[in-house]
Amino acid sequence: MLSKARVKYIKSLQLKKYRLEEQRFTVEGEKSVLELLQSDFSTETLIGTPDFFDRQSGRLKHFTGERLQVSEKVLADLGFYQSNKSVMAIARMKPNSKPDILGGEFVLMLDDIRDPGNLGTIIRIADWYGIYKIIASRETADFYNPKVLQASMGSFTRITIYYTDLIPYVKDTTLPVFGTFLDGESVHTMTWGNEGILLIGNEAHGISSSLEEMVTRKITIPRFGQAESLNAAVATAIICDNLRRP
């Protein structure tokens, strides 16, 4: 049986303040936890139902961390999502380290994506299109937010995200910066080259004026109807799809 102190600790990891203090985060749901175990994250604890541990015994044989068996009710009370009826994990956060960008590589850059669901969906889209590095402003939603991890559907295990001040980062790069605007080149007909930064703006305000000055190629998603704008994650998907077209 979990002590009150242990329950309080696990629940505290739902909040960014305590995640940063402990350098730990939780992952909920069987699919995401199994992908976590196959990744390069360090998983310390599995909290699951007896049924989960029985069904997945073969896939867990190499897991050497702590295993805690609990009922479905206890598991639902512990997590952010009461619909989770199988397992949750506690894992170590990775350092916020600047990734090496290789020649011939595209990366995403997020200018204040505030909605956790949008960030999680963008991570999933990036994984689908083979873009594995994201440069994010410090105001972008927290990568380890439970809503982000849930929306990513396990893709967070394959994506590297780096939080930094975007203007100094862009000043220091030689890569072309593609930014989305209403008056840019059409993503349907343009040529992309083989490398660059795909800059996605804030949900409400788009790309900030200070970053707009640093965009080397303005691009646009042609509009055929009357909608004022596109959701940031939807726009990311359209851009990535056109980028990857032969």
Image (cartoon, helix red, strand yellow):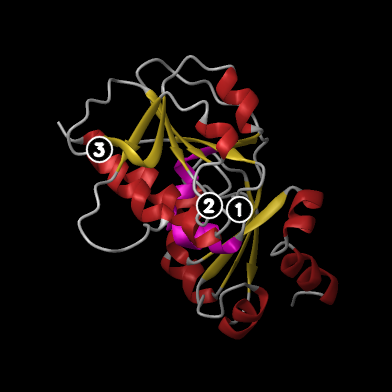
Comparing 103 with 157, the one in front is 103
Residue drawn 58% across the image and 19% down it: 171
* Residue drawn at (37%, 57%) of the image: 229
Please, is residue 231 above or below residue 202 in the view? Answer: below
The x, y position of residue 64, in whole percent, is 61, 49
Question: Which mark is on residue 187?
Answer: 3
User: Overall secondary structure of the magenta stretch?
Assistant: helix
Which image quadrant for residue 187? Answer: top left
Q: Is residue 246 left or right of residue 22?
A: left
The residue that mark 1 highlights is 141
Magenta-colored stretch includes residue 9: no
Residue 56: percent from the left, percent from the top? Answer: 43, 63
Q: Nearer the viewer, residue 25 or 146?
A: 146
Name the residue that disc number 2 marks.
205
- Give amino acid for label 3: Val
In terms of secondary structure, where does tag 3 sit?
A: loop
Q: Amino acid at mark 1?
A: Ala
User: Which residue lies at the image location 30% right of the left edge and 20% below the top edge?
Assistant: 194
Task: First in sequence, mark 2 or 3: give its number.
Answer: 3
- Residue at left 80%, top 71%? 8
